[in-house]
Image (tube, helix red, strand yellow):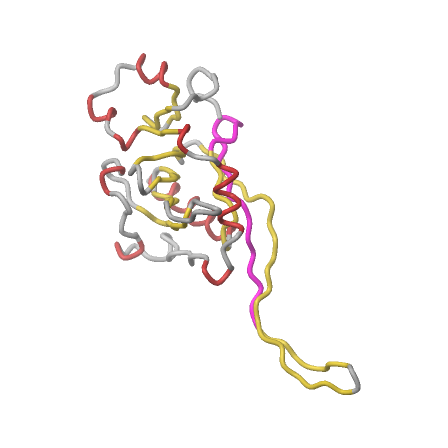
């Protein structure tokens, strides 16, 4: 991941500020106001293993995956927003439109991570550190869906005759995929193994479009 200002690789600490993902040097150069120094703008990149995060999500059964909230374009009601996991990590005017929580550990599953999409940013929050460990602004970002798979769930019933089985099955087919965020052509954030990734992309696109009005 690269700094939106200078293009340098991001280090262990970065900052989401003024709709940009900045390295430590560029953040200090802009002389940002005191409110920008709050934890809501700081990303601790060195505190998270993305491969572990991906493996953890792929191990979760489909029925345990969270459902999408209502589409913001279909309802202007405040009930379409969700309660934030850590209110102090949100900036003024930011509201959660989608979130999911899971245990980080593959062997020792105790520490949790919450992934959040707001009307302004996409974030991964370490619930023990109460800090943002991955993040990207939505303004100016391109949202794409990659690596989709279909998972069928249902029950098959019928009868056996001379070793053969004849019956019918009923159930649903679910689409899973990665939702990727690109800033200035560079990959800045990934939500792995999302149920209905195209629905989430529409939700994000609709929220960004509404925020521009």
36 vs 54, left or right, is left
Does residue 161 sit above or below 175 in this rendering? below
Q: Residue furthest right?
A: 162
Q: Residue furthest front?
A: 108
Viewer-nearest residue: 118 or 211: 118
Does residue 49 sit above or below 161 in this rendering? above
What residue do we see at 59% from left, 60% from top?
Answer: 151
Task: Using the rendered view, name the quadrant where residue 213 is placed.
Answer: top left
Residue 44 colored magenta? no
Residue 149: x, y in percent? 61, 53
* Number of numbered discs overlaid on the protein picture: 0
Q: Residue furthest top?
A: 29
What residue do we see at 48% from left, 53% from top?
Answer: 199
Does residue 178 sit above or below 156 in this rendering? above
Residue 179 colored magenta? yes
164 vs 72, left or right, is right
Residue 26: x, y in percent? 36, 15
Residue 30: x, y in percent? 30, 15
Determine the main secondary structure of the stretch shown in magenta.
Answer: strand
The magenta stretch is 171-188
What residue do we see at 38% from left, 44% from top?
Answer: 113
143 vs 102, left or right, is right
Viewer-nearest residue: 84 or 181: 84
Residue 21: x, y in percent? 39, 26
What residue do we see at 49% from left, 47% from top?
Answer: 56
């Amino acid at each position: 991941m690269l700094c939106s200002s200078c293009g340098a690789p991001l280090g262990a600490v970065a900052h989401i500020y003024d709709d940009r993902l900045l390295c430590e040097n560029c953040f200090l150069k802009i002389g940002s106001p005191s409110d920008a120094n709050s934890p809501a703008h700081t990303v601790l990149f060195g505190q998270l293993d993305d491969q572990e995060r991906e493996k953890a999500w792929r191990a979760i059964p489909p029925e345990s995956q969270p459902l999408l909230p209502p589409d913001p374009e279909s309802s202007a009601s405040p009930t379409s927003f969700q309660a934030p996991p850590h209110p102090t990590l949100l900036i003024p005017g930011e509201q959660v439109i989608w979130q999911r929580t899971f245990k980080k550990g593959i062997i020792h599953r105790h520490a949790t991570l919450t992934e959040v999409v707001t009307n302004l940013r996409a974030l991964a929050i370490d619930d023990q550190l109460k800090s943002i460990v991955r993040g990207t602004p939505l303004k100016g970002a391109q949202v794409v869906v990659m690596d989709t798979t279909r998972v069928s769930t249902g029950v098959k019933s019928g009868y056996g005759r001379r070793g053969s089985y004849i019956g019918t099955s009923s159930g649903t087919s679910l689409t899973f995929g990665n939702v990727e965020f690109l800033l200035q052509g560079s990959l800045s954030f990934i939500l792995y193994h999302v149920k209905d990734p195209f629905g989430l992309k529409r939700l994000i696109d609709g929220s960004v479009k509404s925020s521009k009005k």
